[in-house]
Amino acid sequence: MNRLALACTLAVAAFAQNQKLTYEVATIKLNTSGDGRMMINGMGGGGGRFRVVNFPLRQLIVFAYADRTQGLPGPGSQGPNITGGPSWINTERYDVEARPEEGFVPNAEQSQKMLQALLEERFGLKVRRETKDGPIYVLVVAKNGLKAKKSTDQTPISLAGPPSPPPPPSPGAPGRSGGAPGGPPALPTTGPLPRGIMFVIPGQLRASAQTMTAFANMLSGQSGRKVIDKTGVDGLYDFELTFTPDQMPANLPPGVQFPTPDPNGPSLFTALQEQLGLKLEPSTGPLESIVIESVLKPTEN
């Protein structure tokens, strides 16, 4: 290695080591739309930005402390078990937008550290970790073969890439008609999703350009157990899964509407095999718990 190359390498390493892992600008707003939908455009976006719409604090804690070797947790992902804390961490929902210092694009591990710092600063969050073995599911390819649709564009979703724009309002979308002002954008329940989007409503999982590992994380929130990807399938896929949930959400706020699942439709487990050629098998594995020691409602922006 010549001296110039060595100097550049050392400079990059020093910058990474000295980089303060906090967001330069962050806004956290209480979402009062009453809409049950949640949206994330990946852990990042243009310039490494982090953006979620209509998420409870519990899900934000999942993002911050989940095992990222298993991919980005999707909306509704169970992730690590969260114990302790007041009831509002499950009921109050927030919109979060945060961006790092200009010129710094964090990797996945750095993004998590930055989100942890944000939650500690704005929610006064303090946690500890506990791990023990327990029941999980493993995601495998069913005996009749994989049926999931491979994405046309196999370019990895980049933290440094431009964020995918939300789709135009759809008159048939669930929730407020056409996407009411102040609520999440109206995402269609059919047709293509913007690239990199994950979308969950009762009885329906939709995702665009996601790995099998990311999809396994989405299934965690629907199956009631942690799901580990054991398919051995690489690449990005577009997922469309429709099933009859064990329970529909009770006491939805006025104006919130979801397509009613067929009461005689397939269960999650059957739909996985029939529609995507995937299967959930019971297993045992390490289960991490995040114990909340203290938390407060967020400070003003």
Image (spheres, grey):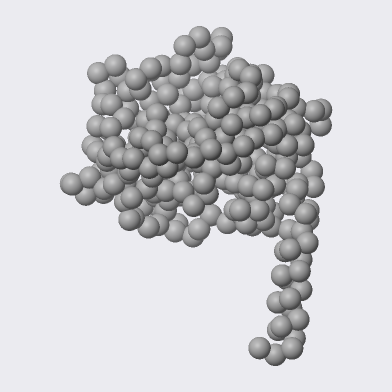
Above or below, 183 against 229 in this view is above
**Most extreme residue toward the bottom, as rendered?**
2
Check the picture and name the quadrant holding the C terminus. top right
Question: Which corner quadrant of the image does residue 87 belong to?
Answer: top right
Q: Residue at x 75, y 27 (%)?
A: 298
Q: Residue at x 44, y 31 (%)?
A: 221
Count of numbered marks: 0
Horizontal placement of 51 versus 290: left or right? right
Query: Between residues 237 and 215, which one lies in front from this camera angle?
Result: 215
* Residue 33 visible, this angle: no
Image x and y of residue 42, in percent: 57, 45
Image x and y of residue 236, in percent: 42, 53
Horizontal placement of 283 versus 257: left or right? left
Above or below, 4 against 103 in this view is below
Image x and y of residue 291, in percent: 59, 31
Horizontal placement of 26 versus 181: left or right? right
**Most extreme residue toward the left, as rendered?**
144
* Residue 102 visible, this angle: yes
Horizontal placement of 51 versus 249: left or right? right
Q: Residue at x 67, y 43 (%)?
A: 115
**Most extreme residue toward the right, as rendered?**
300
Check the picture and name the quadrant holding the N terminus. bottom right
Query: Between residues 261 and 192, which one lies in front from this camera angle?
Result: 261
Question: Which corner quadrant of the image does residue 185 belong to?
Answer: top right
Query: Between residues 22 and 189, which one lies in front from this camera angle?
Result: 22
